[in-house]
């Protein structure tokens, strides 16, 4: 039996040996090829769960707070999703101690609008105009004609923030007139 190796096969055999040596050098001999692939695939797959940036369509990167707020040491160890590919930085924080985003990535303009939305929405439930925060969100969802499960200021885009601000102003005015 005679085996003939094609040049392409030789390339992959040599490449495989080079990669094995490279992995060993890279990890100081601590990981073999299988362990390295598991670790790499885990990192690769976790990137594919990162939120998509609404401004460029790329996956965001999970970063620490010192990337987003270098002047705020109190935020340095918190998780954020961040993207600045061909646009101004867009980011969103994560729920404490997790990699779960608090909302959607937002650029400076949307962050200002979300903040303004909270300024007019939060008094509705904090000043007992509604029984609970949940009831206030239920009212807002009805006013915006969206599902209650989708009614979270952290997930709003510019238009939804603008509509919510208007609805909340009207409701606050209604309460002040009664």
Image (cartoon, grey):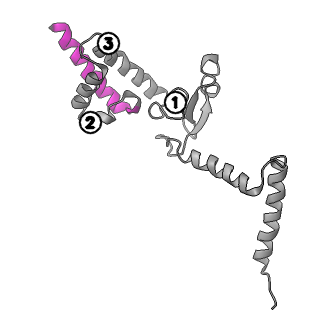
Is residue 158 on the magenta stretch?
yes
In the rendering, at what x and y percent does residue 75 appear?
60, 21
* 167 or 43, nearer to the observer: 43
- Which residues fall within the magenta stretch? 155-177
Q: Is residue 171 left or right of residue 117?
A: left
* 123 or 90, nearer to the observer: 123
Above or below residue 28? Residue 162 is above
Is residue 156 on the magenta stretch?
yes
- Residue 126's label in the rendered image is 3
Q: Which residue is mark 2?
A: 146
Q: Is residue 21 left or right of residue 151?
A: right
Give the quarter of the figure containing the C terminus. Answer: top left
Above or below residue 87? Residue 38 is below
Mark sitting earlier along the chain (2/3):
3
User: Which residue is farthest left?
Assistant: 178
Secondary structure beneath dot 3 equals helix
User: Which residue is farthest bottom?
Assistant: 1
Please name the residue shown 67% across and 52% down the image. 38
Query: How many other residues sit within 10 Å of disc 1, few (<14), some (14-19) or many (≥20)?
Result: some
Please name the residue shown 44% across and 22% down the image. 112
Q: Which residue is mark 1?
A: 94
């Amino acid at each position: 039996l005679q085996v003939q190796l094609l040049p392409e096969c030789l390339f992959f055999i040599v490449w495989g040996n080079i990669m094995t040596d490279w992995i060993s050098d890279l990890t100081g001999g601590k990981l073999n090829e299988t362990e390295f692939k598991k670790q790499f695939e885990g990192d690769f797959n976790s990137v594919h769960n990162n939120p998509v940036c609404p401004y460029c369509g790329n996956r965001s990167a999970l970063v620490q707070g010192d990337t987003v707020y270098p002047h705020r040491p109190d935020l340095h160890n918190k998780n954020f999703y961040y993207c600045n590919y061909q646009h101004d930085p867009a980011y969103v924080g994560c729920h404490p101690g997790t990699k779960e985003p608090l909302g959607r990535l937002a650029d400076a303009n949307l962050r200002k609008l979300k903040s303004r939305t909270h300024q007019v929405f939060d008094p509705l439930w904090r000043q007992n105009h509604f029984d609970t925060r949940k009831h206030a969100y239920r009212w807002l969802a009805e006013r915006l004609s969206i599902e209650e499960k989708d009614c979270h200021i952290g997930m709003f885009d510019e238009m939804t923030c603008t509509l919510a601000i208007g609805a909340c102003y009207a409701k606050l005015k209604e309460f002040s007139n009664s």
